[in-house]
Amino acid sequence: MPANLFGKIEYLKGVGSARGEKYRKLGITTPYELIYHIPRAYLDYRCHVPVQQAVINEYNVLKLTIFRKMPPQRVRGGLVICKAAATDGIDDILIVVYNNVYGFHALKEGETYYMYGKVTGNFLRKEITSPVYISASEKVLIQPVYPLTQGLSANMVRTNMRQALDLMKESPFETLPEHILRKYDLCPLMYALENIHFPESDEAAEISRRRLAFDELLKLQIGMSMMKMRSRKNTAHKMDSSTDISDFTEGLPFELTDAQKNAVSEILSDLCREVPMNRLLQGDVGSGKTAVAAAACYFSVKNGVQAALMAPTEILASQHYKTLSEFLEPFGVKVCLLTGSLTAKKKAVMREKIASGEINVIVGTHAIIQKDVEYKSLGLVITDEQHRFGVAQRAALAEKGDSPHKLVMSATPIPRTLALIIYGDLDISAINQLPKGRIPVKTYAVTGKLRHRAFGFVRERLDEGRQAYVVCPMIEDSESDLLAVKSYAEKAAESDLKGYSIALLHGKMKAAEKEKVMKKFRDGEIQVLICTTVVEVGVDVPNAAVMVIENAERFGLSQLHQLRGRVGRGSWESTCILITDNTGEDCKKRMKIMSSTADGFRISEEDLKLRGPGDFFGSAQHGLPPLKIADIACNTELLSKAQNCARELLEDDPNLEKPQNGSLKMDTLRLFNKEIIG
Ligand code: ADP
Ligand code: MG
């Protein structure tokens, strides 16, 4: 392989340390990585128009010859304006460039260019402002437009790209064997890379994109499979299948649903194998995942090992702690709560008890994966609300024990095909049934005009002994939103909710304060909780039977569904009132879906359609390596082809050790950041 292609980016002509630094900021350290900086669109200079036909106030492509450059004018504030007169042979136009003397310098009198820029003026006098351009002698008329090139001009990136591609062309290589290319109808890699940047035609760009998207999906599949195989190679604590936990199930305040029983038995049978369990427990909000987790913990403890449960927030962790202690302490199981906000002294005491094995079940936040926490014999790790943790964090927890069994719980219902990709390294158990006696939550969408009536309804429920949530949006924890929530609460206390006990709960509060408020709400001392989305994840207070969501338009569908899942957990009829004055089509659609269905799967599918996959499957949500070209939600057909191909390649060469698979393996490691597989 050509060494320079994988050497420093500074190898390219014109890239010094300053420009190199800018590339590194974009995550580009070598010419090869630059080649994988994929254009987000193309500028097509073929479709130029005469000046006469340029659309005013819009971007146009013109073919212009410069006939007079004027000297740069300096105006106040250090602004420099450069102007040049140009013609398309019939009509004249003025080229105006702001603050770019250097760029302007490159334009030559008497030369002809294709220019793309915003045209202003009228039919008599026209201007084109700060156009991007190429020489009319340029043969490649479809030019790439790159994302995120701050401090790097489009022309620079294009020039460097050309050099990097030429470097690769000196000794082109191919990551896939010939028969695979033929079987899946893929173009050669070099052709794809050349044409994704400088396409000969629209079709060439399309063919190239398909090949590169396929590569990416293939690497994703291969990486996931290798992780799976690696964890399967380790041996876990093999538990005894005759362990009896019927005292636990009989002691529960309810009978497990068939779906829960099913999930428990799948999990227990995994625990009795030498291969570490790697399972996703998927179930809609309120389906009762915690009880299933508790059963798995009890089973593990009876088998002489510890179990750990990690939750994304302190509120959720302390709630799990409460539930698990209630369920398990009667059977002599010692449960503890370990979160970041404990005092150092308390933490130290707890760490000792964890290390000595005095404590059997450890519940907490990230605190439980810190280096200083040592377990005596960690046999099972559970993470709740999996999408909040990345692949790496999951792995960190797993490293705590001697390859423990792993269970992740998620309430984000994802269409099964996609779940298999995102959680490709996991087996899946689904709880597809809600506990008996649940009455579906009635949902209404109203405008602000009906707010008083809505609160009249809330008061009636409160008078019957129920509790309520009022959710106010707080996007990105901004101060102004916080003020809005606070003054909302004050106003409510004086008007609609006068005489009722209300409290405020938001993300900026200290953990101890939050916990105090939650406890009071759980104990029924607080009737109305005015809160931000801190309640979104997993809070469980069955007596709360009403939820009002203010500015409902500011929430996505899945988030609304999660929020609504906080009510309808008891045997009362529950209500969710969405308040919004937004009359946009998009918002109307969301409100309609919310009021017409409670099915989490349907809602997530609709969400996917409305929001688009990029947002829905942002890498923060699933912790997968970021994909640049392929779109896992849209390219499902290509995805299943890539899956087949991955299987085929790995069957033939499980560790990709054959020389012909070398560069594919290297690319895969690169995508997964090396640490994860290896
Ligand atoms: P989630 O799956 O959203 O985490 P939880 O585990 O918090 O759901 O359970 C929701 C509520 O349902 C809890 O109050 C829990 O005690 C109750 N619950 C769980 N399983 C059952 C069941 N089989 N029958 C009745 N109530 C149940
Ligand atoms: Mg939960």
Image: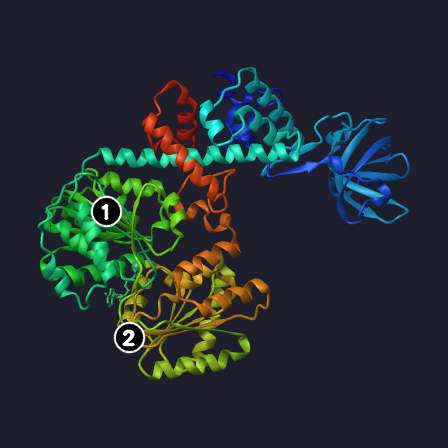
Residue visible at 25% across and 59% down? Answer: 259
Q: Is residue 241 left or right of residue 638?
A: left
Q: Which mark is residue 571?
A: 2
Let me know if residue 589 appears in the view. yes
Dot 2: what SS? loop
Residue 405 lies in what quarter of the image? top left
Q: Which mark is residue 525?
A: none
Residue visible at 86% across and 35% down? Answer: 88
Residue visible at 34% across and 60% down? Answer: 284
Residue indicated by mark 1? 381
* Ligand 1 position by quadrant: bottom left
Task: Mark 1: give few (<14), some (14-19) or many (20+) Cα within 10 Å.
Answer: many
Measure the C-alpha gap from mark 2 to mark 1.
32 Å
Of marks 2 and 1, which one's residue comes earlier in the chain? 1
Is 535 placed above or below 409 here?
Answer: below
* x then y, percent, for residue 70: 86, 33
Residue visible at 30% across and 74% down? Answer: 543
Label 1 near ligand 2 (CB < 8 Å): no
Determine whether label 2 and label 1 are within 8 Å by CB.
no
Let me know if residue 345 appears in the view. no
Is 447 placed above or below 56 here?
Answer: below
Q: Nearer the viewer, residue 17 or 558?
A: 558
Label 1 amino acid? Answer: Val
* x then y, percent, for residue 529: 37, 71
Residue 245 lies in what quarter of the image? bottom left
Residue 448 lies in what quarter of the image? bottom right
Label 2 amino acid? Answer: Ser
* x then y, percent, for residue 334: 13, 55
Q: Is residue 381 left or right of residue 174?
A: left
